[in-house]
Amino acid sequence: MNILFFGSSEISVPFLEEINRSRHKISSVVTTNDKHAGRGRKVTPNVVKTRALELGEGLIQVEKFDEGFYSKFKKLNFDTALVVSFGKIIPAKMFELKPAGWLNVHPSLLPKYRGPTPVMSTLLNGDETGGVSIIEVVPEVDAGPIYAQVSFTVEASDNRDSMERKSVVFGKSLLMAVLDLIEDDLLKPYPQDESGVVYCSKIKKEDLKVNWENTAREIVNKIRAFSSKPGAYCLWRGIRIKLLKAQILPGDEKSMYINGIKSGGRDGLVAKADKKTGILIKCSKNDLIRIEKLQPQGKKEMSSVDFINGYRLKTGENFE
């Protein structure tokens, strides 16, 4: 099968590589324009462009879907277009210009979590099951019929990074099976169940700040969902602290520390900070969270013990 590949992120690359070594052929890779990056604001290609050139694949970069792009697009020859973490919505005009097969790899069990943040939403909501869907692309976002899905367990230790890795591993195998079956005319899609639709939205800057008045579960899920980037954060002594890993303190262990907190102690209180225990923070309902990894602004990530040693965090202080 001759495939036109759309992608622009690190997640796109493994799928590009998998197709490159398969029985299928990539006609061209469509990705976004080079952008200014780093302190020097140097113009830098994205990872998809870099890898596509290394693999010897044809490349088309797009900033806007204008007439200049459409004129190039109409000349392309492909059987199927595949969209994997492209970052732009495909205009309906594209389907009219090339009524080929259009597929998308989406990291959720659709119709749950249509939209731009399915992995983070899975973690924010504390779901115990995640997955990947291969769907047909239609004008309405993530609403196309489903070719195949695969599910996997979301472990308590999973965060955004590990969930994205799982989505890639499971998604690659699923995609190749789907492409083979479509080429052999052995697979047709089925419609999504509209009664089960759940939407997710873009994450805003204000969503990243931890509210210590939330439940322990909500706070830990937020840390999991945004780790390692963009990162959930709090403030301490005016310093922005990115929280990378945390866990809820079990009830039997919590009782050892919670009685020492004065009645009415505010949420965000450092209930304990020492090398043996680590950093324990009070949140709503007198629950405690143990912070295991964190990253002060402008510094490298570190363990709670290294933070205590380097910044002299003391019991009784507050995280804001």
Image (cartoon, grey):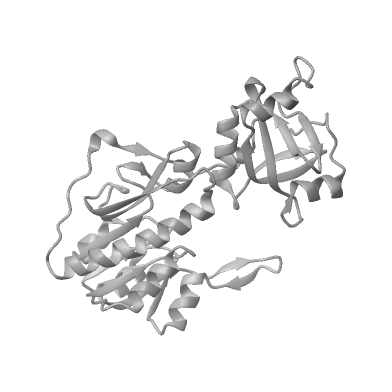
Note whether 209 is above or below 22 in the view shown.
above
User: What residue is rendered at 42% in x and 46% in y?
Assistant: 118
User: Is 178 in front, or is 197?
Assistant: 178
User: What residue is rendered at 37% in x and 81% in y?
Assistant: 58
Left or right placement of residue 30 versus residue 221 in this view = left
Q: Residue furthest bottom?
A: 56
Left or right placement of residue 315 versus residue 255 in this view = right
Quarter occupied by the N terminus = bottom left
Residue 103 picture quarter: bottom left
User: What residue is rendered at 54% in x and 73% in y?
Assistant: 45
User: Is 197 in front, or is 22?
Assistant: 22
Residue 76, position as x, y percentages in the image: 26, 76
Quarter occupied by the C terminus = top right
Residue 39, position as x, y percentages in the image: 71, 65
Could you tell me how many numbered marks the image carries?
0
Left or right placement of residue 9 versus residue 263 in this view = left
Q: Mark yes or no: residue 28 visible.
A: yes
Residue 296, position as x, y percentages in the image: 76, 49
User: What residue is rendered at 36% in x and 71% in y?
Assistant: 68
Q: Residue furthest front?
A: 252
User: Is 30 in front, or is 180?
Assistant: 180
Q: Residue furthest right?
A: 312
Note whether 76 is above or below 186 in the view shown.
below
Residue 285 picture quarter: top right
